[in-house]
Image (tube, rainbow, N blue to C red):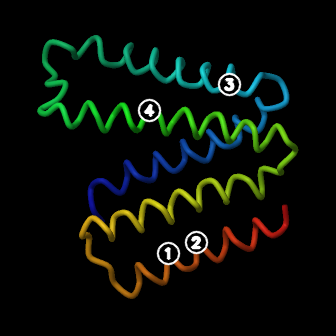
């Protein structure tokens, strides 16, 4: 198993719980305000974790890293905002969660292939299953 797999699993667990918390919050907060709360919480927690290591940590090695991190932040706001809107409109978490997460899997895998990562029959089959599964769930909305 690749060492990064454990981190990917923890990220998946976080993403799954993020989905649940987004759905739960959607009935109680304004969509944009909720997205700002999520982003601010992430920023404050990140700063709290970074501060003790600030003197011994190289923050970046190229301005490209800053640009991509900013673009990821823009996407993160989009995730928060549109997930809250989806759930606030009454979309069930059993439908919305797999569409959001499955759709993100399909996009990430497809972009990885476009960036030159190898694709195997197993990877293509897995990607097809994700797309088919998300499509089936979307048809129940």
Q: Report whether 28 appears left or right of 31.
A: right
Label 4: how many residues lie within 10 Å, few (<14), some (14-19) or many (20+)?
A: few
- Residue 134 percent coordinates (x, y): 67, 68
Secondary structure type for disc 4: helix
Residue highlighted by disc 4? 73
Residue highlighted by disc 1? 127
Gap in Å between the C-alphas at discs 4 and 1? 25 Å
Gap in Å between the C-alphas at discs 2 and 4? 25 Å
Q: Nearer the viewer, mark 4 or mark 1?
A: 4
Residue drawn where x is 68% and y is 24% of the image: 32
Q: Report whether 119 appears left or right of 58.
A: right
Secondary structure type for disc 2: helix
Residue drawn where x is 50% and y is 75% of the image: 127
- Residue 75 percent coordinates (x, y): 49, 39
Check whether the beta carbons of the residues at disc 2 and disc 1 lie within 8 A of each other.
yes
Query: In terms of depth relative to the viewer, which is nearer, 101 or 14?
Result: 101
Which badge, 3 or 4, is on the more N-terminal residue?
3
Q: Report whether 125 appears left or right of 65.
A: right
Check whether the beta carbons of the residues at disc 3 and disc 4 lie within 8 A of each other.
no
Label 3: how many residues lie within 10 Å, few (<14), some (14-19) or many (20+)?
A: some
Residue drawn where x is 85% and y is 42% of the image: 89
């Amino acid at each position: 198993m690749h060492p990064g797999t454990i981190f990917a699993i923890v990220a998946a667990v976080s993403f799954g719980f993020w989905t649940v918390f987004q759905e739960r919050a959607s009935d109680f907060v304004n969509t944009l305000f909720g997205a700002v709360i999520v982003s601010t919480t992430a920023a404050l927690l990140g700063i709290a974790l970074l501060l003790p290591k600030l003197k011994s940590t190289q923050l970046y090695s190229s301005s490209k890293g800053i640009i991509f991190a900013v673009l990821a932040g823009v996407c993160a706001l989009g995730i928060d905002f549109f997930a809250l809107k989806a759930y606030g409109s009454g979309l069930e978490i059993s439908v919305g969660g797999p569409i959001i997460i499955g759709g993100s899997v399909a996009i990430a895998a497809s972009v990885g292939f476009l960036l030159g990562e190898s694709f195997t029959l197993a990877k293509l089959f897995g990607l097809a299953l994700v797309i088919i599964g998300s499509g089936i769930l979307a048809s129940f909305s």
